[in-house]
Image (tube, rainbow, N blue to C red):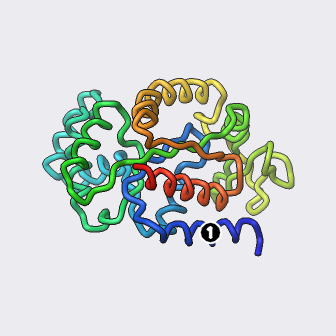
Amino acid sequence: MSSSATAIANGRDSGMKTLPGPILLLGAPGVGKGTQAKELVKLWGIPQISTGDLLRTNVSLGTTLGKLAKEIMQRGELVPDSLVNEMVAVRLQQPDTANGYILDGFPRTLPQAGWLDGRLATQTQALPVVAVSIRVDYNQLLRRITGRRNCPVCGTIYNVYVKPSKIDGRCDVEGATLVQRADDTEKVFVERMRAYEAMTAPVVEHYRTLGRFAEVDGDRPIAEVAAGIIAAVERLRAIA
């Protein structure tokens, strides 16, 4: 069995030992957080809860919360924590969250973290949030982002550093000229990293102080990173 297959098998075994509960998955731009969230959803059979998705869904469905959020966004203002909290509260009442869920983009601030912790503390059977951060070297992240090239026809993604096309600048499948997204530049990456670190540092410290925070090495194959996250959750659940 290959190392990746072994990691997936181990991950499935680990995932069956205990309920995952609520997991806050953290990671800087380019670490593969979205990919890992999908892996964990498959392994555990729990939903991924994204505040961005919740906002879009509520707005598109025209819910009371969605109408309020739309009015605020149309004024060019940020949706307040109180409204985001309400959307999350409604989502957490759905039965598919009973065994746990992957939190994506929430809690993003200390007040949100405090609200969520307080809400879970009032529920007898609810497990507390554990936070796991995917860590990748800064320079490696920069190469992942700035080296990314997309085929405008078939959508295939290449990387000039780690996964180049056979013919420089051309898609292997369509032969089309590869393009770089406007936000895949070093300038944009630096700003996104600054914003991420400023925003998440207090939340990370909050869960670290509570003994509910762990880091995993994200510079490994997808299955091995997933197995590392699962092992971290197992450790944190044992002491939380």
Placement of 115 over or under 168, stated as above or below:
above
Q: Amino acid at mark 1?
A: Asn
Q: Residue at x 50, y 57 (%)?
A: 234
- Can I make out residue 153 in this image? no
- The residue most toward the bottom is 1
The location of residue 91, given as percent across then percent down, is 25, 56
Task: Depth check: give the residue in front, 199 or 144.
Answer: 199
The location of residue 147, given as percent across then percent down, is 73, 40
Task: Depth check: give the residue in front, 45 or 58.
Answer: 45
- Judge left or right: residue 41 versus residue 123: right
Q: Residue at x 62, y 40 (%)?
A: 135
- Can I make out residue 215 in this image? yes
Placement of 104 over or under 115, stated as above or below:
below
Task: Depth check: give the residue in front, 148 or 123.
Answer: 123
The location of residue 182, given as percent across then percent down, is 60, 34
- Helix, strand or loop at label 1? It is helix
Residue indicated by mark 1:
10
Q: Residue at x 81, y 53 (%)?
A: 165
Placement of 163 over or under 106, stated as above or below:
below
